Amino acid sequence: MRKIWHQITENLFPVFRRRLSGVDALPQLAVLGLLSGLITGGVILVFRLAIEWPLEYFLPGDGSESFEELDFLTRGLLPLAGALALGLFLHRLAIHDRKVGIVHIMERLNYHQGYISVRSAIVQFITGVTTVITGQSAGREGPAVHLGAAFSSLMGQWMRLPNNSIRTLVACGCAAAISASFNTPLSGVIFAMEVVMMEYTIAVFTPIILAAVSAAIVTQAIYGSEPAFSVPALTMNSLIEIPWILAIAVIIGVAAALFIHLVDTMGRYHHRPVLLRVAFCGLLMVPFALFIPEVMGIGYDTVDLAIHGHMAFWLLLGAGIAKLLITSLTIGLGMPSGVIGPTIFMGATLGGAMGLIGAQIAPDIASSVGFYAMLGMGAMMGAVLQAPLAALMALMELTRNPHIMLPGMLIITTASLVTSEAFGKKSLFLTILKSQGLSYQSSPVIQALRRVSVGAIMDRNILRTERHLTTEAARKILKAEPKWLVVEGSNGPTALLPAVDLARYLEDAEELAAEKGTKPADTVDLMEIPANRRDIAPVQYQATLEEALEVFDGKSVEALYVQRHVAPMIQRVYGIVLKSDIESYYQYRRS
């Protein structure tokens, strides 16, 4: 089957792949974006159903989030048993196979050009479902983003696309996953570009938008067109509330900084055995599950109650603080939980609690509790992820109310500034990457080089030849008018020389023989004749210009030959790339 698929891709996609090597392949990227969205939408449907069906059958009451209605003993034992099962499962995996979630996607983008394995997707599916149905403090959006990115990446790998296109597909999968989870296509687009890719380009916007829209259509066919939360009409009653909104922004910013700090602190124990860490997470969860069961699972039922003003102050405040503590501690210790859902929970409950305080202080002026709950959601999401624009778009799409934009912009940006500037915290995902000894490069130069494949700038006017040639064979080669000659060795290409140098040598040899009245040599050694030879090293056809520069620096060569595996033990050479070609291309694009 793999051989048949290999033949199909080789015969049908060469022109398609060649166009995708550059930055101007908008029609091709648009098609890929649509495919990514459809695939991701289907995957997210399966993922959500895998969570909801067991919970609807197991939990008492209506819906799939009524953990509060479980009896006292079951509430305590369920997360502990789930943590032990997850710990045993992760213990049997290699360390690199345990990595899941959005942080893992960012790592694969930064260090592996967005290549994600089937095994990684399977592990994420199992852990994502298990954390939620066993009542851990978890969200489904982080695992959904991983799954969307993974299946989109796998599609690109199966089609043997250039790496710059696979990176775009990963972003499409991220956007589609957020869109399908919340029914918020626009915030999915901004999330993918602001949080995951950390760049904005016109060429990438179109496929990501199409992916988000197509994924939303798939999920709307099953769940309807309503957003994730039922939000009443919300508006700010008076401008006098602005000082109170700023005060709430400061409180949310402090809470977000504390959340990031606790995750980072607990991450220092990652050298401990994973079974021990995850089992301890289960133990930590027990008292919270017993006395504040609202923190169990995703908790969107509690978010709905907070938005509609159906929760008392102390329950809102207690649930918000409890969610912050248990989620940060367990995620920091290695529980493979999603973080976006808990962030929304914390923001809604803390914002709702502050709204109740405001109503007590100025009952004739204060807006509804739901208004402040929604503002708290946006502020916490923006501050924890350091993604104010994505949080603002999510707030707008969830409320479908333009009147919330002005206070939303104010509270989200203020909370984000408090977290980043007053406490010096980067986004949660970058903080976790740093704790793992990794970084995320997002400079303009790196971003520009990642958007282009070597296939877009390579010189195809080459000819592969053996080192030793007869004079007649050398002249025959020159009749093909190649620009470069790739000299073959025992283990593949070993040197590169301009064809004009061979032509000059043959001409000089004939003139010298004529002067001496002798016959020119019958053979030519391409490694011995006077020529401007260059050492060469291979680079794969799918590689980006960033990868090509890394090969130049690592191998200390003067040229790269672009190759691709076309059959068992056979590599086809497509062209040549010089370091000056990459520099010239970047200078041209920048100008």
Image (cartoon, helix red, strand yellow):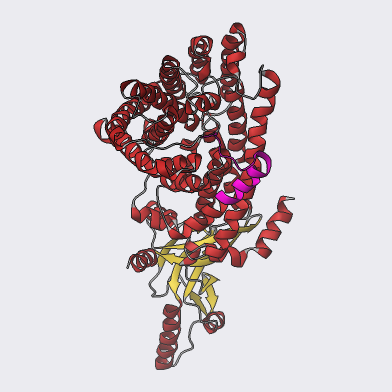
Residue at image position (70%, 59%) is 7
Q: Give the number of marks.
A: 0
What segment carries the magenta color?
212-231
Closest to the observer, 183 or 168 = 183
Closest to the observer, 338 or 539 = 338
Residue lying farthest to the front in this orientation: 364
Q: Is residue 71 magenta?
A: no
- Above or below 118: residue 573: below
Instruction: Confirm whether residue 111 shows in the render.
Output: no
Magenta: predominant secondary structure element? helix
Residue 553 percent coordinates (x, y)? 37, 53
Closest to the observer, 508 or 80 = 80
Q: Is residue 225 magenta?
A: yes
- Above or below 174: residue 529: below
Quadrant of image for the C terminus:
bottom left
Closest to the observer, 197 or 530 = 197
Residue at image position (41%, 46%) is 194
- Judge from the rendering whether residue 558 lies leftward or rightward of residue 302; answer left or right: left
Residue at image position (60%, 32%) is 123
- Above or below 394: residue 310: above
